[in-house]
Image (cartoon, rainbow, N blue to C red):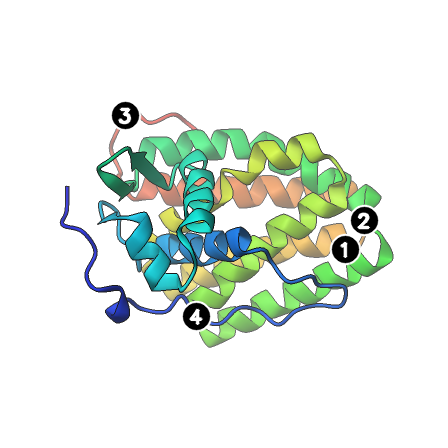
Amino acid sequence: MTRPADDPSTAPSPGPSPAPSPGWAAPTLTEAAYARLEEMIVTLDLAPGSVVSEAILGRMLGIGTTPVREALQRLAREHLVQVLPRRGVVVTGVDLHHQLHVLETRRELDRLIARAAARRARPAERAALARLAADMAEAGRAGDLRAFLRQDGQLNQALADAARNPVAAAAVASLHAVCRRFWFFHHRAEDELATTIALHAAVAGSVAAGEEAAAAEASDRLIAHMVDFARGTAPGLETLPQG
């Protein structure tokens, strides 16, 4: 186990939040704490194995310990931290086997959500998805990994909202951040970023166009690519589940 995090005044900032959209409501303190901690974990500002405390994180974020505690409980359910009573909070490790099991689960849920969203999305939601696909392409051209990761989270939420299936949305919500962190941890090549963004944009574009079959196929292609990417981080391990 690594030493506790350094003085929070020296910790890197998670970056600016996206501009609010029409109808946007200010997040609660718990939601704000969750969003900032999730991004810091995903982008390795809080590295795997780091040991922190609610008090340190509260000072780092300028948010009270109760919202931080509630945010950490959600992050624990999403497999990003482990809360050890009277000992602190440990950022979980990046695990290949866990990633492959997550993707095996996401394949079915993401396909269901993409198809339902293509069928049920309202006109304003379709327009927002089309804009998001364009924003992702712009992030790819700029090589802005953090912007893309934020947009990926926005895409997941937009698809879940448009699908209008709260059961599927709740089931898959805990899996997305794990995948983003795994990708960020192992990402190296610019062509990988371009390919990943193109596959995400294809899902958004198909849903925006109301094409159910194409949306499901685009979702499957994205997950298949993510499985190949994950398996490529440890070639030759025969015990890994197949995609």
Q: Which quadrant, please, contains the N terminus? A: top left
Q: Which one is earlier in the sequence, the residue at label 3 or at label 1?
A: 1
Residue at the spot 58% in from the left edge and 55% down from the top edge:
28
Answer few, some or many: residues within 10 Å of disc 2's Cα (few below 14, many 20 plus, some between 14 and 19): many
- Mark 3 and mark 4: span between their CA atoms? 39 Å
Q: CA distance from mark 3 to mark 1?
A: 39 Å
User: Mark 2 and 1 residues: CB-CB less than 8 Å, in contact?
Assistant: yes
Q: Earlier in the sequence, mark 2 or mark 3?
A: 2
Q: CA distance from mark 2 to mark 3?
A: 42 Å
How far is disc 2 from disc 1 in space, using C-alphas? 8 Å
- Judged by depth in the image, the label closer to the viewer, 3 or 4, is 4
Residue tagged 3: 238
Question: Which mark, residue 121?
Answer: 2
Q: Which callout, 2 or 1, points at the residue further toward the start of the chain? A: 2
Residue 53 higher or lower than 103, as above or below: below
Badge 2 amino acid: Ala
Q: CA distance from mark 1 to mark 4?
A: 28 Å
Q: CA distance from mark 2 to mark 4?
A: 30 Å
Hey, which residue is sitting farthest right in the picture? 123
* Amino acid of disc 4: Gly
Which residue is under mark 1? 208
Vertical side of 120 occupied by 62: above or below: below
